[in-house]
Structure formats: structure tokens, C-alpha cells
Amino acid sequence: MDVTFSVSSSLPAPAADIRRKVFMEEQGFKEEFDATDDAATHIVAYSDGVAAGTCRVFGEGDDLHIGRIAVLPAFRGTGLGSKILREAERVARARGARTVTLLAQTAARAFYEKNGYVAASERTLYDEGVPHVVMERSLVRGK
């Protein structure tokens, strides 16, 4: 599997398509697109030339946020999600971030833990009725 990335300052059509399929059609979210899309850096992962996953990086300062991480069903279990996280962390580090924070669906918590993220709080937050937890990862080497 040859994986390449595109990085854009505006929401590209492949990212919107993936998010629509994963979050709206598959998971039933209604309010997928928001003003953060206008200010975020968008990443699309291509597997052998096919748009397969996406996320966005946003915020200011040394703690940036990663969000809307989505991988199409046919590409799950291939390691693509972890590659998307590494690319998002690379983008965040290039923007001066020392840490990254994300709001993980609790069902995906183990995936993020496997990728070096820890819960910032045990408090459960809800987005359209789906439980989430705030997780973070240091981007400083040795931490």
C-alpha cells in the first residue's frame, strides 16, 4: 500500500466526501461541517491513488487540535489511521505545536492509546449523543 498525502488550507472535495460517508452516512451525525473547516489545515490520505482517509488540524499556539479523523471502511485495519495521525502531528509540529489534542469517540480510545495518546480527563463529553474523551500527545522528543 503506497500512501501519499495532500495538505490544504481549504476543505477539499475528497475530504468532504470521506467525512460525509463515515460520519453522516455510516455513523448518523447530522452536523458534520462547521466554521472550523474554514480555518483548519486539511489532510487527505491516498492509498495507491485512492482517497481513503482524512483529518484536520486547527488552533493557535503550541497546543493544536486534530479532528475529524476518518478512514473509509475498505481501508480500516491497514494502518492508514496511524499514518494519518503521524502526518497530522508532522503538520502540527511544523506549525510550532508542542502537544496535540483531540476529541476521540470512546469506542476508538484504544486506537489512540496505541498511537501514544493519553486521556487528558476521564470526563465523558457528548457530540450528537456519541460519547467522546479528550486525549493528548506530546510532540516534544523524549516526553
Image (tube, rainbow, N blue to C red):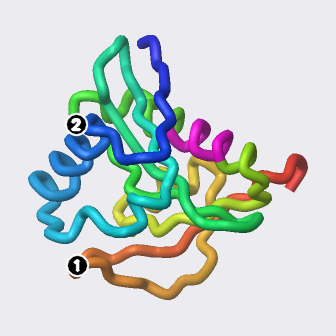
Q: CA distance from mark 1 to mark 2?
A: 21 Å
| Secondary structure mostly taken by the magenta-highlighted segment of the chain | helix
Q: Give the percent coordinates (x, y) of residue 63.
A: 70, 66
Residue drawn 13% across and 52% down? 26
Q: Look at 57% across and 44% down and name the residue there.
A: 88
| Residue identifier under label 1 | 128
Q: Quadrant of the N terminus?
A: top left
Image point (42%, 66%), residue name: 36
Q: Amino acid at mark 2?
A: Pro
Q: Which residues are magenta?
A: 84-91
For the residue labelled by badge 2, is the local secondary structure a helix, a strand or a loop? helix
Check the image and report above or below for 61 versus 142: below
Q: Position of residue 86 (x, y in %)?
A: 61, 39
Classify mark 1: helix, strand or loop: loop
Query: Is residue 123 in sight in this rendering?
Result: yes
Depth check: 34 or 54 in front? 34
Q: Amino acid at mark 1?
A: Glu
> Residue pushed farthest right?
142
The tag on residue 73 is 2
In this view of the protein, can residue 71 be seen by the observer? Answer: no
